[in-house]
Image (spheres, rainbow, N blue to C red):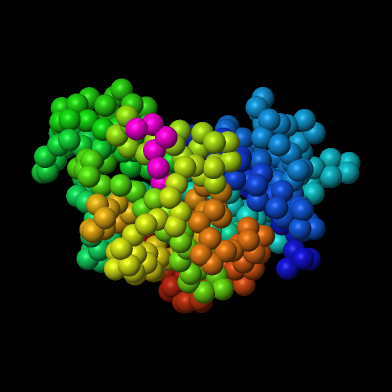
Amino acid sequence: MTDAQIAVAFGGPSPEHDVSILTGLQAARELHDAGRAVTGVYWTGTGDFYAVPATLEAESFLEGVPRGAEPLRLSAGEEGGFVGTGRMGRPRRLDVDVVVNCCHGGPGEDGTLQAAMDLAGVAYTGPTVAGAALGMDKLAFAGVVAAADLPCLARSPLHPGADVDFSGPYIVKPRFGGSSIGVEVVEDTETALARLDANPHLRGGAVVEPFRPDLYDLNVAVRSWPALEVSAVERPLKSNSRSEILGYADKYVGGQGMASAPRELPAELAPAVEAELRRQAAVVSALAQLRGVARIDFLSDGESLFVNEINTIPGSLARYLWVDPPLPFRSLLDDLIEEARRRPARRYSTVGADGTVLRGAGAIAAKLT
């Protein structure tokens, strides 16, 4: 483990850009302090990559790319990976065994970056392309959960002319997004539809579900290596009692990502409710083909449970939830890295493509007539 060359990727063209920087800097600093060979890979809001030191502070990114950062590109192919510029202007491949992916939201968490690293032959932590895409798509995830007979609230696509077959009030959410960004509570369908043009976060797709003020959030982390494990359950707390939902500021205003948000941990739950939540978390992990560490969010009234969402690259990598029993952040990171090395996200194969079809194909021109 200690001989692995590690890169920590963070940032990205996403509304969660700033939060991703915090998570990435936490992971990079922890690995650096443990004596690991680690480099930061900063993904800018415009899509460029830079190599940066693992010891930077958040303020280094206030003006954009930190001073002294080295430009990189992500190249596909057998010799692919993160490539910079070496002596005499020649390409120099960044020596990396594993990328710790700390990119929240957008292309860092929806499968785009995962697919690029698969093509580049780069080992990385966190979800596969399929798992990332499912976790980011609230409508698809709800459909998979419902098909598995797990309890969940009704959820429908929201678009002009949509037929919402349950009554308000509603929660309107971006179909592809997280961290409660762009989420609104509205009273009726007309207002919900009006928000499609007014709320920029909804323009890439939106979903609507019933707003249940009697329900509160319960979150749990799950990890897949060395074996499936479920963390303590938390009940996040709202910092603003007048807010109808747990918002972005409740989660991240403390300055350490989710690690500094107010919470009840472990949550005070009836034993039967906690046992059922843990069972459902294991089922969701299998449905989403869990890899790495994820956070599964539930809604509850203290007796009933509803599966809400899965966050496949959670804030602060959900390190704050491992309290019963305690799991040091360093151990969590070591396990993520070990899994990435021993259980690659994707292995491509040409088995079955033996030339038989090509040999019998005949002339292409003849096939076009």
Q: Residue at x 53, y 60 (%)?
A: 322
Magenta: main secondary structure: loop
Q: Visible in this render: residue 368?
A: no
Front residue of 32 and 13: 32
Q: Which of these two is toward me, 29 or 82? A: 29
Q: Position of residue 257 (x, y in %)?
A: 55, 41
Where residue 72 sits, quadrant-wise, is top right
> Relative to 128, is 301 above or below?
above
Q: Quadrant of residue 201?
A: top left
Q: What quarter of the picture does the N terminus occupy? A: bottom right
* Left or right relative to 333: residue 363: left
Q: Nearer the viewer, residue 40 or 271?
A: 271
Q: Tell me if residue 8 comes above or below residue 208 in the rendering.
A: below
Residue that appears at 68% across and 55% down = 80
* Above or below, 99 relative to 354: above
Instruction: Tell me if I can see residue 34 in this picture.
Output: yes
Which region is colored magenta?
236-241
- Residue 37 screen position, x and y as percent: 78, 56
Residue sitting at x 65%, y 51%: 27
Residue 123 left/right relative to 165: right
